[in-house]
Image (cartoon, rainbow, N blue to C red):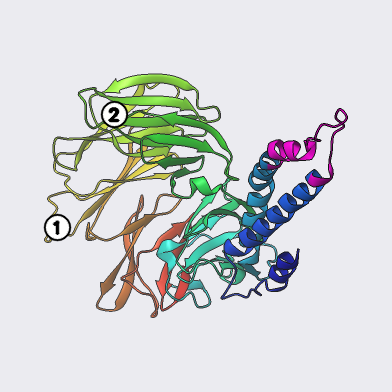
Amino acid sequence: MTSLLIAWAQTPRTNAATGVGLRVPLLISALLMLLIASSAALVASLLRTRTARYLPARNLGQQLAWLVVPAAVALTLLLIVQPLSRNYVLSSNERLEGSPQVAGRASSSVLNGSVAWVSESVAGTGADEAIGTRFGVAIPRPDGAVEMLDAATGALRWRYSRSDSDEKPVITATGNGDYVLALFSDVGYLLLNADTGRREAAWPSRMRDRFIQQPQPLLTGERGGKLHGVDPDGHERWTYESGKCTDLGAIATAETVLAFVSHTCDDQPDELTALDVQTGKKLWTKTSLDSYRRPVVVAGLVVVAQPGGDTDVPVALTAIEPSTGDVRWRWAVPKSWACRTLLNAAGKYLIVVDCPGRSTVENRRTVVTAIDANTGLTAWQTVAPVSPRAKVTVTADGRVVSLSRAATGCVANVINSAGFRQVRLPTGIDCTRDPRAVGNLVLTSGPNTVIALR
């Protein structure tokens, strides 16, 4: 009891820079268990049983203690101490700043060369790491924090930070944009409310080493060919295992998960398996002669790139109906194309970015094609004098935007169904950083700032 009181009195104070680790709650828990064991021994020594006259009395209390106390201590550690200790460490090391008001709505960037807003300092990060949610634009910070910016004004709505993690968290939006799922080093996955910044859940520690296969619907993967259907709070609905000697990738629509299983150390053909997104029930399995790449979901279909030999250039784009595995349509990639063949979804259109020629330094043209996902027909195609090596972002309405440096400064290259145009941007925008589209809002980076283009 004395040791417990001393440990309780010496519990360190926490602030934004220093917190407590598991040693503190574990020490207090160990002292509590010692107190329980001592109390049990004391009670056991007082319990006697009636015996025949002139025979020594057996200590029934000791016998009960040998059986009951170890089980009670183990259950207490597992069911009470461990959850309480982890919750104590999580809560004592977190800081939530800001009093968020009603979130504003972002206006679409018309890209006329002006700026909609400039954020406060976000040293060490930029727009290329931003994610969009229903309540603003989330930014990960190198000091182990997540900041939520108002999409209409760029003002800071809230800031969530931890004193037990000083590395930049990996963030993604899930739950239809209602949550930010953040992976903090040495902590694990934490679910933050995108509106308030409050921590809603902490995933079990055994899920710390998993990777996010897809944020919406939420799928996680782990080495060894395992795929999990997970709720935002970390509850596992199902697990699918592809077996040994396999690599497993997956993508999902709102109803169906497509798992791409490739065999790595046996002669079995690759497989394409469909699972129910809610239950994980296997719907169908088909063998595949091709290793599908770059899957993307467009209008309820899964479009994959069909590789052509040893090169990374696909020979065709194939649309698969997830519920049946049937091929809805096949779009042949021109043989002259030789660049990245980027695939992006924009409403009912599949936006394909490539170059109409060899991938050389001299090639300074980019071709953008919009394919109607319902029919597989080309809706529009534009060839622009833009380097095919420029990093691009695609807005929700199908505009392909990149940045480049010109004689007059930084310019934005805009390619869409209307053709190609260049827009001169104001000074202060870093052309070496990648632009980022959040819906129809285009974000760029400045010196320690995020800049939204009007």
Give left or right: position of 322 versus 15: left
Location of residue 129 by image quarter: bottom left
| Image x and y of residue 69, in percent | 71, 42
Q: Which residues are magenta?
A: 45-69
Q: Nearer the viewer, residue 65 or 243?
A: 65
Do the residues under discs 2 and 1 have CB atoms within 8 angstroms? no
| Image x and y of residue 116, in percent | 51, 71
Image height of 356 relative to 169, above or below? above
The type of residue carrying mark 1 is Asn
Location of residue 263 by image quarter: top left
Does the magenta run of residues contain 63? yes
- The residue under label 2 is 330
Using the numbered discs, state the Cα–Cα distance from disc 2 to disc 1 in whole angstroms. Answer: 28 Å
Q: How many marks?
A: 2
**Would you say residue 241 is visible in this rendering?**
yes
- The residue under label 1 is 363
At horizontal 50% and vertical 78% (from top left) the residue drawn is: 121
| Circle number at residue 48 | none
At horizontal 51% and vertical 39% (from top left) the residue drawn is: 217
Does the magenta run of residues contain 67? yes
Image height of 274 relative to 357, above or below? above
The type of residue carrying mark 2 is Arg
